[in-house]
Image: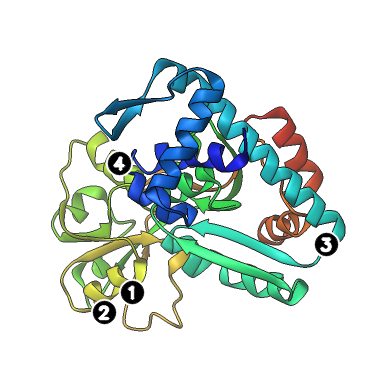
């Protein structure tokens, strides 16, 4: 038994049993992957995969039972390597952070700059994606730290920690009728205008939909996007009223827009930081977390990881 055999099994499952993709991931040949899997099956005395001719189509019952063990062995091997690196070179290495577009664009820039100033020899990889993609990168081990508002709490493999709370705002062009409203804007008033906001699953969109639904209202959502800057662009063109995260707005920068508070309309959102349970974090990873959220000290995060729950 060797780690290449274990990696072949893990990547086969992750790649949907497509051995061509597995071979590319492991920098080997498809016959080489097949041989590694077959040799492991022969050593264990069971078939791990269901086969249809030469194709792999799924996991056998023994395969279902063995996969978590394979994942744990590979995770521990990676942890061993990281632990050794942590002791031998505390200020060098790499850190991969996965974040949604809004977090990467508005919440993380100063954190990244401060981290780079403190750890200039650490290569920082910043991946952007949907909340589900961020969670998947954490679960697969592709990312060390994930930052998103939604989805992270849905994965039992992840420890999630609260970072900060935020609300939504309404944005309109200058001289829009909503600017003449006396008192706070209502949901019913918003239904009179086309709405431009986030795609489903992004940046608190569920709270927006829930608010309208709770009042029996159906907003006219004419355009959705992943990124607040895209939403701003189309609001500036007069195509509709925008609903965006308040953290994405700056009156000095967004001079062509007018901002209305929507904190009374939609539920408060919580941005969370995710870490894969059981994963070893390098010392500088804890420093990145504490730079982002000063209350998330190394001791607090370590205790949370040991407890294995959600804070």
**Residue 264 in sight:** no
Q: Earlier in the sequence, mark 4 or mark 2?
A: 2
Q: Which residue is mark 2?
A: 174
Between disc 1 and disc 2, whose residue precedes?
A: 2
Image x and y of residue 101, in percent: 42, 63
The answer to which of marks 4 and 1 sits earlier in the sequence is 4
- How many angstroms separate mark 4 from mark 1 (CA)? 22 Å
- Return the x and y of residue 209 as percentages of the image width and height: 27, 43
**Mark 4 in CB contact with mark 2 (< 8 angstroms):** no
For the residues bearing labels 1 and 2, Cβ distance under 8 angstroms:
yes
Disc number lying in front (4 or 2)? 4
Report the mark closest to the observer, 3 or 2.
3
Return the residue nearer the eye: 39 or 3. 39
Q: Residue furthest right?
A: 87
Label 3 to label 1: alpha-carbon separation: 47 Å
Q: Quadrant of the C terminus?
A: top right
Q: Where is mark 3, residue-wise?
A: 90
Give the structural element (helix, strand or loop) at label 4. Answer: helix
Pointer 1 residue = 258
**Along the polypeptide, which appears first: circle 3 or circle 1?**
3
**4 or 3: tag closer to the N-terminus:** 3
Residue nearest the viewer, comparing 199 with 115: 115
Query: Residue 109, relative to residue 17: is it above or below?
Result: below
Residue 158, given in percent of the width and then of the height, sits at 56, 37
Mark 1 neighbour density, 10 Å: few (under 14) some (14–19) many (20 or more): some
Question: Which secondary structure lies at badge 2?
Answer: loop
Q: Residues within 10 Å of mark 2 (few under 14, many from 20)?
A: some
Using the image as rendered, state which of residue 234 and residue 71 is in the foreground. Answer: 71
**Badge 4 density bin: few <14, some 14–19, many ≥20, Cα 10 Å:** some
Q: Mark 4 to mark 2: distance in Å?
A: 26 Å
Q: Which residue is mark 4?
A: 211
Quarter residue 97 falls in: bottom right
């Amino acid at each position: 038994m060797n780690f290449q055999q274990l990696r072949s099994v893990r990547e086969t499952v992750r790649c949907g049993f497509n051995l061509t993709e597995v071979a590319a991931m492991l920098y080997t040949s498809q016959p080489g992957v097949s041989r590694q899997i077959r040799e492991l099956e022969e050593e264990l005395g069971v078939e791990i995969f269901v086969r249809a001719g030469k194709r792999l189509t799924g996991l056998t019952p023994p395969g279902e039972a063995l996969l978590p063990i394979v994942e744990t062995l590979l995770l521990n091997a990676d942890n061993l390597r990281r632990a050794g690196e942590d002791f031998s070179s505390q200020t060098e290495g790499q850190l991969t952070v996965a974040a949604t577009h809004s977090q990467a664009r508005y919440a993380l820039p100063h954190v990244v700059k401060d981290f780079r100033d403190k750890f200039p020899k650490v290569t920082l990889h910043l991946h952007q994606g949907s909340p589900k993609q961020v969670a998947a990168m954490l679960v697969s081990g592709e990312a060390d730290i994930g930052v998103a508002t939604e989805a992270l709490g849905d994965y039992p493999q992840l420890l999630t920690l609260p970072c900060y709370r935020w609300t939504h705002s309404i944005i309109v062009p200058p001289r829009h009728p909503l600017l003449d409203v006396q008192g706070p804007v209502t949901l019913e008033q918003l239904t009179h205008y086309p709405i431009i906001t986030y795609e489903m699953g992004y940046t608190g969109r569920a709270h927006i939909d829930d608010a309208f639904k709770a009042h029996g209202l159906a907003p006219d959502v004419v355009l959705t996007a992943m990124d607040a800057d895209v939403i701003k662009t189309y609001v500036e063109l007069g195509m509709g009223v925008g609903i965006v995260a308040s953290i994405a707005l700056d009156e000095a920068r967004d001079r062509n827009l007018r901002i209305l508070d929507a904190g009374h309309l939609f539920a408060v959102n919580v941005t969370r930081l995710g870490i894969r349970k059981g994963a070893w974090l390098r010392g500088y990873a804890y420093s990145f977390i504490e730079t982002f959220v000063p209350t998330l000290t190394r001791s607090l995060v370590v205790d949370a990881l040991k407890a294995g729950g959600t804070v």
